[in-house]
Amino acid sequence: MHDRTAPAAQPLLMAGDPPALERRNPRGRARFILLCDHASKAVPQRLGTLGLEPAELDRHIGWDIGAAALTRILADRLDARAFLSGYSRLVIDCNRRFDDATSIPAVSDRTEIPANRDLSASDRAARVEACFWPYHRAIAAELDAWAAAGRVPAIVSLHSFTPVFDARHRPWHVGILWHRDERLARPLIETLAAEPGLVVGDNEPYDGASPHAYTMPVHGLARGLPHVQFEIRQDLIADDAGVARWADRLTRVLGAVMADDGLYTVRPAS
């Protein structure tokens, strides 16, 4: 995993800041792990509110609404280990290469992020070291431990998306993102599509082959592990009732699909 960055001027996080990583059910016995890249809207104290009104961080630009709550419930119900990022995607996006232009956006969905303008190399490095690497190093260490034990896990990443973006209405209730390796995506798409009234996107509303993404290409595809990314429409999981409905659905769906022993093999990246 490439992690060379410019040296940070000083540690970004202070006493009282939340951790950069939440681990849920660390001794879970399921054969797959759950990841939530955009679980939090927290901002380090040193960065204030990034120059935004606090309500802006509650919006989809600050985090993936509903995704963290859903991840925690699924981890508990399915006895799966889960890793959740600790800071807002506006501080640094844990599903972007840290050298990507979208990693620390100066503008997100037409909203300017004042604290993200004109960052120095050391400012960027401080965010990478404090908020990006703890999450990804923990995932990598977990996967290394499974490999050392001769075990092959699957990876399930949970995200959410807005019903409307850039004036475009998105009809899908859930999307399944994948690239090159569809052994987990295909049965999930087919199983979800059989649910009454559910509109399922195949690489919608985003493409699993996006050159900007980090988590699935690095932890899944490069290691040859079965992997998939869920995208659930945010209005469907914006409150406790919606999260509960989708937790029921995905407990059932993942329980069925992940029971296939044939999934758990290493497939060399093509």
Image (tube, grey):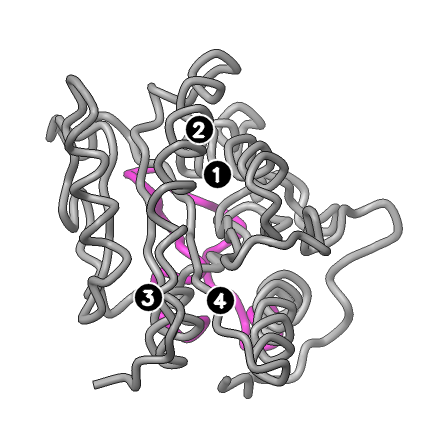
Question: Which residue carries the number 2 mark?
Answer: 59
User: What element does badge 3 sit on?
Assistant: helix
Horizontal and vertical percent position of residue 217: 34, 72
- Label annotation for residue 62: 1
Q: Residues within 10 Å of mark 1 (few under 14, many from 20)?
A: many
Whichever of labels 3 and 4 marks the residue nearer the N terminus, that label is 4
Q: Measure the C-alpha gap from mark 2 to mark 4.
A: 33 Å
* Residue position marked by numbered label 3 in the rendering: 262
Q: Nearer the viewer, residue 80 or 103?
A: 80
The residue lying at 37 percent from left, 79 percent from top is: 266
Inter-mark Cα distance, 2 to 1:
6 Å
Please give the range of residues in magenta: 98-124
Residue 19 lies, in percent from the top left, at 75, 52
Q: Nearer the viewer, mark 2 or mark 3?
A: 3
Circle 2 sits in a helix, a strand or a loop, which is it? Answer: loop
| Residue 190 among those drawn in magenta | no
Of badges 3 and 4, nearer the viewer stands 3
Q: Is residue 106 left or right of residue 140?
A: left
| Element marked by disc 1 | loop
Of mark 1 and mark 4, the one earlier in the sequence is 1
Viewed as shown, does residue 122 lie left or right of 67? right
Q: Residue at x 47, y 22 (%)?
A: 243
